[in-house]
Amino acid sequence: MIRHRPNGSGHPYADDTEQRFPVQPVAGESLRLGVRTSGEVDRVSVELVTTASEPRTELIELSPVRRSSRGQVVDGGHLASAQARLARDQGGWQVSLPASALPPGAALRYRFTAHRGDSTERTRWFETAVAGWEKADDAVIADPTGTVVPGSVSVLRAGDRVTRVRFALPLKPGEHITGFGERFDALDHRGTTLDSMVFEQYKSQGEHRRTYLPMPFAHVVGGDGWGFHVRTSRRVWFDLGASSPDRLWIEAEVDEAVGSPTVSLGIYTGRPHEVLSAFLDEVGRPKELPDWVFRLWASGNEWNTQAEVEKQVALHAEHDIPVGSVVIEAWSDESSFTIFRDAKYTVREDGGPMRLADFTFPAEGAWPDPKGMVDRLHEQGVKLHLWQIPLIKMRPHPTGQAKADAAAAIRENVLIRERTPDGGLRPYRNRGWWFPLGLMPDLTDERAADWWTDKRRYLVEELGIDGFKTDGGEHAWGEDLVYLDGESGASGNNTFPVAYAAAYGRLLESCGKAPVTFSRAGFTGSQAHGAFWAGDENSTWEAFRWSILAGLSAAASGIVYWGWDIAGFSGDIPDAELYVRAMAASVFVPIMQYHSEFNHHRTPSRDRTPWNIAEVTGDASVIPEVRALVQLRERLVPYIAASARVTLETGKPLMRPLYFEHPDDPQVWEHPVQWMFGDDLLVAPVLEAGVTEWPVYLPAGEWLDVWTGTRFDGGQVVNVQTLRDTVPVFARADAWGELADVFQS
């Protein structure tokens, strides 16, 4: 076998051995061509025909290389994915063509040959054009405000198509650039580069500077105060003063005929909350969620039986730690994601929706009485959410209802498709490393989305489920995907997670429930659809800081209902200090929730419950400290709910970076991980181990330490003595009368 895939897997941040890189050759840049082979291969060559002024044919030898796929490297036969088994028998071969071999406007035609002794195997011919950058008229950018720097516009032309547009916006000294959706590494991105692409970065998002929830929207704070939105769902790259300190360069993907490319640019002026409000007027405002979402959310991936869920809820009650919501991740058969594990049923061959009466639940099974469990939780004031994934699992080969669902999805034409080498279409098979080769419903299409969510309707209508954890919205990889409305992956992939949450929200509303979804992926437009959390992360102080920065940047982009896995969810449990510090900070975050990763039920347990942290660390004081913090959160719920309603009316974030209130105060940028929680509380979490004193910047105004009652004038840094269970919090002095009972009960 010899294979060349020009587009590769579609991984946005890594290229595969067997692809063309860059996919769109550009004059003045080198080009790498590669293949993957199986079996014993002596050598690989490429026959390259370049047509510029006149055709030229070359035969070029490729060199063996380590094979990479989907951003992961195969070295010595090991790959942390399903492809590891094939590594020993598959090799990679590549060649790099110099920039001098790629004249602008040239056409390239090439094919590969694998040589095994006297035998050969060839690929088909592949064709592409060499693109070149050209100056363009400023009118290419739809910018009625005239903000684009005159003469800065250029386009990347390949034959009769334009594939990218580049232009500059002015950047003044002292301006800070923030927003861009959920960003983990910093609040102010001036002097850096980034892009807008939905991506599942498993842990260390701040280090890799990748995000589940990007947006091509930003605030420019300082000076006159303004913001911008590149109105596209395609990928956009930003150079935020990195290459030129007085220019903000933007490069956006397009696919337009020569002479017609247009990038629409939204420019908003005013203070940050005015900029954000104008942006939300355009892309959609958040919907109000019920007050109960502000109570503690609890979950663990190993709470995978009814007995374990009921045990954990009982332990919350025993320890007097109020819990408002439970999320069950490992509830389903892990194939259909619609049926409780161990349930007995007759397969519905047409793949249609089933009802509760279609199932029996064995007494000895994992979930002997789901309906009774939900009812009992509701009687205790606990809401229940079920985990979802937008895929039909195809590995191992599906059986039972999952097999019928897969056949029905193909027959009913409800799947995202991908282009075949001959130009046809076939169902897209997930290229990511999580549930590889799964089929993916096109939830951007209302008919397909209804087909998908109707299969889950009985969970809401009959069992009484209160919401869904809409996980894994990042699996649409590659420009060659085709959605049911004809959109390509280039323009559709970023919007998929928005449609995913919206579809489940419609299901819940149609059953008389609030549209409470809990997602980690999103894009522009996600503001209107449910709640979000910051995704997968280790239990480290560094990850603590990254997650809070993510929440602040998401809030600056219009996400209201946001939380994180308190003190991380993956790997070794946090020590008692990190756990309590993180729990204390989360009292003042819109969604307060803890979660833990699956650990194969090994001991010691890695559950992030307070009692497990206390047991494993040997620090019994964790439980009373967390009890006091969660009870404080319960008393804060009315304030949080009232503040959220103000947010929905005004656009001022609930979890509000300090520059929203004080855009002209340079000191707020020296203390980026502080925030206003509503109008009246300033929060400054302790982000280092082993400290008992923490510097807090108090901006203009009069402030009161909620723990001591001490008053301070603003415009100064105060060093606060802080126990590990008392995050530094200050109230506006004129609001203290209404808040005193919350903190001093």
Image (cartoon, rainbow, N blue to C red):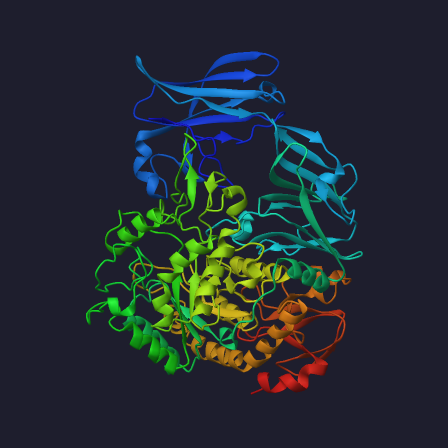
At a point 50% along the width and 62% down the height, the residue shown is 533
Left or right of 514, for residue 407 = left
Q: Nearer the viewer, residue 328 or 702?
A: 328
Q: Quadrant of the C terminus?
A: bottom right
Horizontal and vertical percent for residue 497? 49, 54
Q: Is residue 631 visible?
A: yes
Left or right of 649, for residue 92 = left
At a point 74% along the width and 47% down the height, the residue shown is 143
Count numbered badges in the picture.
0
Horizontal and vertical percent for residue 658? 69, 65
Q: Nearer the viewer, residue 29 or 235?
A: 235
Left or right of 178, for residue 342 = left
Q: Nearer the viewer, residue 296 or 416?
A: 416
Q: Quadrant of residue 374?
A: bottom left
Q: Quadrant of the N terminus?
A: top left
Q: Quadrant of residue 697?
A: bottom right
Vertically, is 487 above or below 683?
above
Q: Is residue 683 visible?
A: no
Left or right of 707, for residue 82 = left
Vertically, is 46 above or below 687?
above
Horizontal and vertical percent for residue 664? 78, 62
At a point 65% along the width and 58% down the height, the residue shown is 282
Horizontal and vertical percent for residue 221? 74, 57
